[in-house]
Image (cartoon, helix red, strand yellow):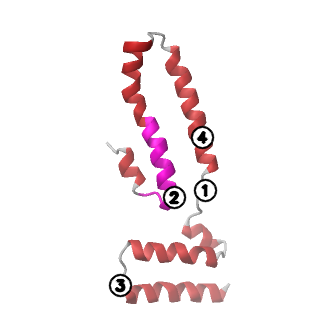
Amino acid sequence: MIAYTHVMEFLPGKVTEASGLLFFIDGMVLVLSPLTLMYLTTNTDVFLWAGVIQNIVGLGGFILMYIPESTIFLLEKGLFKIARPDIEHLLKFNKATEASKVVALSLLDRLEAKK
């Protein structure tokens, strides 16, 4: 089973905070559903409306969040200035050596000079 916490590891920077909140709300359904049935009501339509509201909030959050383009897409479109910080972040995240950083960034410079 892949838990939300595993998925969140693949999300960059600020997106992780917003996604974490949405994932928390989604996970709380498993806690609140039995409590609702036990103490508040036995009407299961409540869960239908809770799901609709949750999906609206989730979709709204998804639309409002800035979802960055992939690095490959940026390179293919020739947006090298936007792709450079992403590549530098990837090199830092992967703990690349200085030599491999120089090689990767020089390849980016050569690609940029071609276009």
Label placed on residue 59: 4
Q: CA distance from mark 3 to mark 1?
A: 30 Å
Q: Is residue 7 magenta?
A: no
Circle nearer the N terminus (4, 2): 2
Q: Are marks 4 and 3 in contact (CB under 8 Å)?
A: no
Which of the 4 image quarters holds residue 79?
Answer: bottom right
Q: Please name whichever residue, 59 or 28, is drawn nearer the observer in this view of the structure.
A: 28
Q: Please tell me which residue is depicted at 49% across the width and 42% down the height of the picture.
A: 22
Which of the 4 image quarters holds residue 3?
Answer: top left
Label placed on residue 66: 1
Magenta residues (range): 10-26
Q: Are marks 1 and 2 in contact (CB under 8 Å)?
A: yes
Q: Which residue in the protein does label 2 denote?
A: 14
> Element at badge 1?
loop
Q: Which residue in the protein does label 3 denote?
A: 97
**Left or right: where 84 falls relative to 26:** right
Q: CA distance from mark 4 to mark 3?
A: 40 Å
As shown in the figure, which amino acid type bears the numbered disc 3?
Thr
